[in-house]
Image (spheres, rainbow, N blue to C red):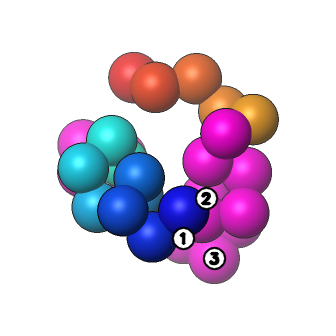
Amino acid sequence: MSRNRIGVWDSEPVTSDSQQTSTDRPTL
């Protein structure tokens, strides 16, 4: 999950909720 929030969630604000719902939320 940590690797996803670094690369995929680079554009969006990374929060405590994002890392847990990284797979649930669409990759924008």
Vertically, is 24 above or below 19?
Answer: above
* Residue 16 tag number: 3
Q: Position of residue 27 (x, y in %)?
A: 46, 26
Residue at (33, 41) in percent of width and height: 8
10 Å neighbourhood of mark 3: few (<14), some, or many (≥20)? few
The mark found on residue 26 in the picture is none
Q: Is residue 3 left or right of residue 19?
A: left
User: In which image quadrant can residue 6 be found?
Assistant: bottom left
Q: CA distance from mark 2 to mark 1?
A: 5 Å
Query: Quick check: 18 above or below 26?
Result: below
Badge 2 is on which residue? 18
Range of residues picked out in magenta: 10-23
Q: Are marks 2 and 1 in contact (CB under 8 Å)?
A: yes
Amino acid type, residue under disc 3 in the picture: Ser
| Residue type for callout 2 | Ser
Residue kind at label 1, given as amino acid type? Thr
Instruction: Locate the N terminus and report the quarter of the image it occupies.
Output: bottom right
- Is residue 17 part of the magenta span, yes or no? yes
Left or right position of 8 against 21: left
Residue matched to label 1: 15
Instruction: Locate the C terminus by quadrant.
Output: top left
Q: Eyeballing the image, is 25 above or below 9?
A: above
Q: Residue at x 73, y 51 (%)?
A: 21
User: Residue 11 at x, y = what percent?
Assistant: 24, 43
* Residue 9 spot, x, y in % from top left: 36, 48
Q: Secondary structure at mark 3?
A: helix
